[in-house]
Amino acid sequence: MNLAFKSAIVVILMTIGSSAPAFAGPSEDNGSAAVENAVAALDRADYSTALRLLRPLAEKGIPRAQFNLGFVYANGRGVPRDFAEAMKWYRLAADQGFAAAQHNLGIMYANGQNVPPDHVEAVRWYRLAAKQGFAKSQNELGYDYAQGRGVPQDYDQALKWYRLAADQGEAGAQLNLGTLYATGQGVAQDPAEALKWFRLAADQSNAAAQFNLGLMYANGMGMPKNPAEAAKWWRLAADQAYVRAQLNLGTLYAMGQGVPEDKVRAYLWFSLAAAGGDPAAPNYRNRVAQEMTPAEIAEAQKLAREWTPNRTAK
């Protein structure tokens, strides 16, 4: 079966759902013990207790409490989701220099939550947090420089901010830094350096990095082709519902490359990719079905119905 791999290198932009640190912050604030109690209540989903503890602390001006109260409203934890209220509390904490609140305020401007999308304002808040060493904002700032979003496109600046975040272990920045080296954007193309950064992010269960590692091994980017290693990394990403990896893994099973040929497994992964919205997957599934018995198709459909993702990506 002649099915082509998808081969686009992936860059991801972190969003508030995945990049905002839920309850992080320094413990030196006045009222720290009470804030810790509120955070513990949030962790155990005791939202009424968390709100009862957080609100008076936030009203006293304690930035970590203001930040966490903003998080509660932004994510609808025990209250209706209210972006206006979230922005109010994030801003109060951000104006006191609380980096996590500055970051989340930037995310809200970027995503147009309670305000029209405003990437210039988002960049302003990311920069304030990034200058404090806040890795997630450093990654966002690097992305905006790479894309020319809210600032003039500048790959030197993108590289600078990605590296600062990547050196702190920020998986999204490691992915994005690897992408610059893989594609030669703003730097000399360097597959070995790309591989290094993708692997660091992939080892943190970042699904896009796992996908990109698979591409490098499948296509022999800076190394001999190794479909078995590609299958390994695509399986890890596919298990996290990463659609492109599901499609490519199905392709390997259909062709018997890097894994034993298995039409049932191919049909399974094509079905999951189709359910995830990949436009090529239904055609691939239909083509592999032509070589399957009705019993094999039924088995694959059962596996697809019973499949659940392992969502551990960072």
Image (cartoon, grey):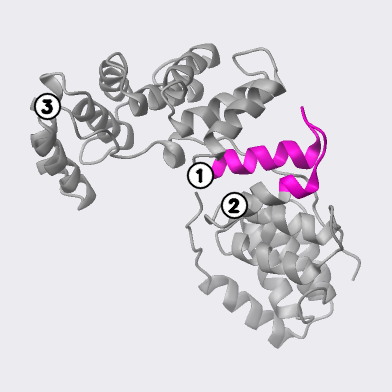
Q: What stretch is highlighted in magenta?
A: 171-194
- 53 lies above or below 234: above
Residue positioned 87% across, 58% down in the render = 4
Vertical side of 13 occupied by 117: above or below: above
Q: Residue at x 41, y 23 (%)?
A: 132
Amino acid marked by disc 1: Gly
Counting from the top left corner in percent of width and height, residue 214 is at 73, 59
In the visual, does 67 lie left or right of 251?
Answer: left
Q: Name the residue under label 2.
A: 200
Question: In the rendered view, does 81 fall on the left or right side of 241?
Answer: left
Report, in whole angstroms, how far the alpha carbon at label 2 lies from the one at label 3. 37 Å
Q: Do the residues labelled 2 and 3 touch (CB within 8 Å)?
A: no
Marks 2,1: beta carbons within 8 A? yes
Point out the tag, 2 or 1, that comes first from the N-terminus. Answer: 1
Q: Which mark is residue 30?
A: 3
SS for callout 2 = helix
SS of the residue under disc 3:
loop
Q: Residue at x 64, y 66 (%)?
A: 235
Task: Identify the disc placed on residue 169.
Answer: 1
Q: Where is residue 311 in the image (x, y as percent from the top left)?
A: 48, 58
Q: What residue type is labelled 2?
A: Leu
The mark nearer the N terminus, 3 or 1, is: 3
Q: Main secondary structure of the magenta part?
A: helix
- Judge left or right: residue 152 versus residue 288: left
Residue located farthest toward the right when viewing the structure as drawn: 2
Give the mark, 2 or 3, whose residue is nearer the N terminus: 3
Residue 304 placement (x, y as % from top left): 59, 71
Q: How far apart are marks 2 and 1 (CA)?
A: 8 Å
Residue 33 image-quadrant placement: top left
Inspect the image, locate mark 3, and give the three-letter code of the amino acid beneath it.
Asn
Q: Is residue 277 left or right of residue 120?
A: right
